[in-house]
Amino acid sequence: MTQTAPAAEAAADAPPAIELRGISKSFGPVKANKDISLNIRRGTIHGIIGENGAGKSTLMSILYGFYKADRGEILIGGKPVDIPDSQAAIRAGIGMVFQHFKLVENFSVLENVVLGAEQGGLLRPSLARARTLLTQLAAEYELNVDPDAKIENLGVGMQQRVEILKALYRQADILILDEPTGVLTPAEADHLFRILRGLRDEGKTIILITHKLREIMEVTDTVSVMRRGEMTGTVKTSETSPQDLAERMVGREVLLRVDKAPATPGETVLDVKDLRVVDDKGVERLRGVSLNVRAGEILGIAGVAGNGQSEILDVLGGTCTATGTVLMNGEEIDLSGKHSDGRSRRRRGIAHVPEDRQRLGLIMDFHAWENTGFGYHDDPAYGSGILMNNAALREDTAGKMERFDVRPPNPALAAKNFSGGNQQKIVLAREIERNPALLLVGQPTRGVDIGAIEFIHQRIVELRDAGKAIILVSVELEEILALSDRIAVIFDGRIMGERLPEETDERELGLLMAGIDHAPGDKPDWQVVEEQLKSKRGEVN
């Protein structure tokens, strides 16, 4: 759907929906935003991209009232406005859909939409008004959702629609979306893009914050690039390319594809059969998972977050108990937790890069040199008995930092003082340089800059080419397709099927991630598939 000529001309002649003039914001000595000026036209989808620490989130937090700019001016529809808090932003017609949804899970859709926007002392009239308005919005913007459904019973795609409905209910003309597809299947992302285009064509202004260049190219009209707190330029999306945008973000040429030769798999390193995990609430998280991975290959596990892939890594890494059979180089691993934990896994040649580097991979207040020794502090190279040779560990860390391009290369810095990408490099250096037989790596590039992504992918491929087995868990299908030699798709604790990267695509994998199975190579009936997806999403007609 595209804007009609009169609508487009009217939008072009109108004052900008948003105009930022000389916005600056510092946190102590750190200048997060430096004299930023930006115009965003009404009735457009405007992308904002940049590396970690580029200042995108700070700029949007100023616009939504979370931060107050040190200097500068905000104009909405050509008129200066003061936005000291989020309520002022809402009154100015700005709504924000956060990456992590702000919904009350045991409330209904209707109650969540009304929450904080009740009119008068009685709730019932507000609910009745909201029900009528939700029906109108659903018909107008393809935001079909059962108003009486509990949030806890809805999938993430439907929850995101509720967040959009909340903003529209509050009469937002400007919508800010922060990494909106991070937890969506490709089919759900495509549907979101249709919704955003519909909102744009009705005159709404959309600001899209994302690190996914493909999404920028697919759905935006214009895109602004930030680097080191400054706005480096704004271009029409039709007049740029992913490569150009990547170079603008990083300031150098970036290899966007993964350069790797075909795998030459050897003997089976890991063989998993009928793996089952029940959590402390009695919910079965893994339901008979079976898989294997061989030396010299990367097995990618694709799935929407929360479908069991985390539990697979936890079991194999020794931080979670399970039932079933796991053989490592033909020898069975104890899954009960009585005689096996993370240390015994490491002794068997299993290294683990956890999905959450800050919570599970690092101790943020400890030095980099201390973090590189965690889990391996009994290595004879670091001392003997109860005494550690800290000087040897610091020297070893300095070498790892040089080889993995950690910036700044200072072993004495606390982990919290490194960027997300450099924190990830510290964890990867610690695990990869132990020369493991099996590497478990979860979300290797989550929240990581484009330049660091390129580096991390190269290190993983190098490990594979050295004959090591790798299990890769990622919610990024582009990453799964680019790195994997085989792909297993998980849904609701079960492996839905395996595919070869060269014989599949994001659309087919997305169906499997949504729990819709079909034989490899078959062309599904897309009308039937759409009905199945609607049923799984809980849509109302």
Image (tube, rainbow, N blue to C red):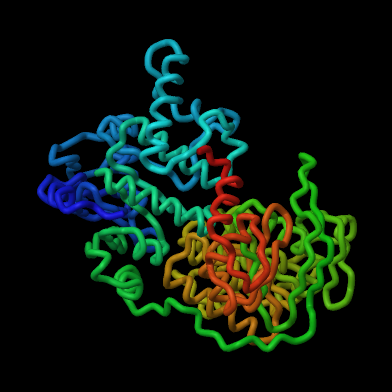
Residue 59: x %, y % from top left: 30, 49
The residue at the far top in this view is 121
Task: Look at the picture and state if 199 lies above or below 286.
Answer: above
The residue at the far left in this view is 13
Q: Residue at x 60, y 51 (%)?
A: 532
Looking at the picture, tell me which residue is in the foreground, 282 or 303: 303
Does residue 331 appear to the left or right of 200 in the view shown? right
Does residue 157 appear to the left or right of 318 in the view shown? left
Residue 24: x %, y % from top left: 23, 50
Image quarter in which the N terminus is found: bottom left
Q: Residue at x 67, y 73 (%)?
A: 299
Does residue 268 appear to the left or right of 12 in the view shown? right
Asked if residue 149 can be seen in this view, the reply is: yes
Q: Residue at x 54, y 71 (%)?
A: 505
Task: Look at the picture and state if 143 lies above or below 416.
Answer: above
Total count of labels: 0
Q: Residue at x 32, y 70 (%)?
A: 245
Asked if residue 370 can be seen in this view, the reply is: no
Residue 132: x %, y % from top left: 41, 25
Residue 358: x %, y % from top left: 57, 55
Q: Quadrant of residue 75?
A: top left
